[in-house]
């Protein structure tokens, strides 16, 4: 069982729900969704589809922002952004990197994402940015 991480976010960002999955933890802060993948997983449409469905079911028709808080090292298939691009309620995608290699990977991912896409060095900056798209 993975330890649930409590984020130190500014006032107004209240954790509403957590979802523990086989590939990571999902945190719902109203309409901002923070995902933290487990170390070494391969994130793809195939591995993430069930999480996306559960999240969309929880969020309903509300607009939302997806933030990938990359506290662990894992792989992602950037071509699978084509599926996220088709989610009409998704307004923007943010990636929080803590390692230099993560910045290079996120730059590649940005080329496949048609939604507003931004990289950050910490989660607080990312959630404040994300709120601007809601």
Image (spheres, rainbow, N blue to C red):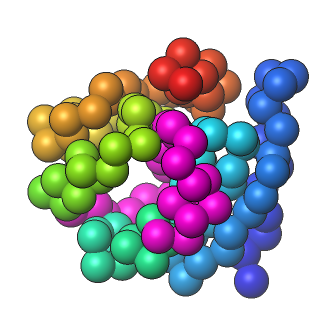
The residues colored magenta run: 53-77
User: Is 9 situated left or right of 45 in this image?
Assistant: right
Image-based side of 54 in relation to 5, left or right: left
- Residue 129: say if magenta: no
Q: In the rendered view, would you say 3 is above or below 69?
A: below
* Image quarter hosting the C terminus: top right
Q: Nearer the viewer, residue 69 or 30?
A: 30
- Residue 69: in sight, yes or no? no
Residue 131: x, y in percent? 59, 22
How far across and how far down the image is residue 127, in percent?
61, 28
Q: Which residue is outermost to the front?
A: 61
Q: Is residue 65 a member of the stretch shown in magenta? A: yes
70 or 86: nearer the eye? Answer: 86
Residue at coordinates 71% horizontally, 41% vertically from top-left? Answer: 30
The residue sitting at 77% across, 58% down in the picture is 17
Q: How many numbered marks have been drawn onto this rendered protein structure?
A: 0
Name the quadrant containing residue 49. Answer: bottom left
């Amino acid at each position: 069982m993975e330890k649930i991480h409590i984020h130190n976010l500014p006032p107004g960002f209240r954790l509403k729900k957590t979802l523990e999955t086989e590939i990571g933890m999902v945190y719902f802060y109203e309409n901002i969704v923070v995902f933290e993948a487990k170390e070494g997983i391969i994130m793809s449409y195939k591995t993430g589809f069930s999480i996306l469905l559960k999240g969309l079911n929880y969020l309903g028709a509300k607009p939302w922002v997806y933030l990938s808080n990359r506290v662990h090292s894992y792989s992602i298939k950037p071509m699978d952004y084509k599926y996220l691009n088709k989610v009409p309620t998704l307004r923007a995608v943010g990636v929080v990197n803590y390692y230099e290699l993560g910045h290079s990977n996120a730059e590649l991912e940005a080329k496949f994402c048609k939604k507003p896409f931004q990289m950050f060095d910490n989660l607080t900056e990312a959630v404040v940015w994300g709120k601007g798209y809601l």
